[in-house]
Image (spheres, grey):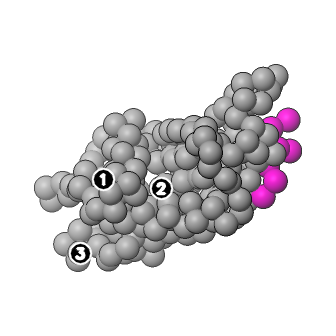
Amino acid sequence: MAVSRIISVSEKIIKASSTTPSPLKNYKLSLLDQVMSTMYIHIAFFYPRPLHHNINKSSKQELAQVLENYLSKTLTSFYPVAGKLKDNVAIECNDDMGAKFLNVELNCSMSDVVNLPDTGPEYLAFPKNLPWKTSYDKGSKFAVAQLSHFKCGGIAVSACLSHMLGDGCTVTNFMNDWATIARYNSSSKNYVTSRPQ
C-alpha cells in the first residue's frame, strides 16, 4: 500500500508575503461559486533528478524553503486562496489563514510508482491520509501544496485549490505564477481580480 511508502511529513502554514489591501479584504463569491462543488482541483508535476546533481538533506531543505518563500509571494496575487470562508457567501481575506505546505519524503522512486499494483502517481502526490480532501469543510485551507521527494532524487510538486475559488485554469495559472516567481524571482501577475460589488 502506498501510504507505507511515506517516510516523513513536515507541515507549515504559508501566509501571503504582503497584506491584502483593505478594499479587497472581503471577496464576495458569485452565485455560481456559492453553489459550486466544494471539491478540490488537483494538479501535480513530476521532475526526475537532474543528471550530475547531488541530492542530500541540505539540498532538499533548500528546495523546500525556496518553494515556501515563492508560494508566499504567489499568495499575494491569489489572495482569496489564503482566506477563510465567511457565511458561505464571501471569503475573508485577512491574511490569517494562509495555505498549507507539506514537505514529504517517500521511500520509493518515481519509476516504482507506475509499477504499484493498487495505485498510481496521484496517490503519492495526494496521499489519502494527508489533507487532500475531496471536499472543503469549515476550517480547511482553500489551498494545499506539497513537495514530494522520491528516493531516486526526483520530486513532485503538487497543489490543490478549492473549486469554490476557480477551475482547472485557475489551478494552472496558480502553478504557472508560482513557477515564474520562483524561476525569475519576480513579482507575480494578478490573476485573481476583485469582482464588481
Label 3 residue SS: loop
* Of labels 3 and 1, the one closer to you: 3
Q: Mark 1 and mark 3 in contact (Cβ < 8 Å)?
A: no
Query: Dot 2: few (<14), some (14–19), or many (≥20) neighbours within 10 Å?
Result: many
- Report the residue marked by disc 3: 21
- Report the residue marked by disc 1: 29
- The amino acid marked with disc number 2 is Phe
Precedes in sequence: disc 3 or disc 1: 3
Q: Residue at x 36, y 45 (%)?
A: 176
Q: Nearer the viewer, residue 64 or 51?
A: 51
Tell me where residue 61 appears, x and y as whole percent.
63, 65
Tell me where residue 134 appears, x and y as whole percent.
60, 41
Q: Nearer the viewer, residue 24 or 11?
A: 11
Residue 103 in view (yes/no): yes
Label 1 residue SS: loop
Q: Residue at x 59, y 52 (%)?
A: 146
- The span shown in magenta is 1-8
Which quadrant would residue 10 be assigned to in this image? bottom right
Query: Dot 1: few (<14), some (14–19), or many (≥20) neighbours within 10 Å?
Result: some
Q: Mark 2 and mark 1 in contact (Cβ < 8 Å)?
A: no
Distance, label 1 to label 2, CA atoms, is 14 Å
- Report the residue marked by disc 2: 142
- The amino acid marked with disc number 3 is Pro
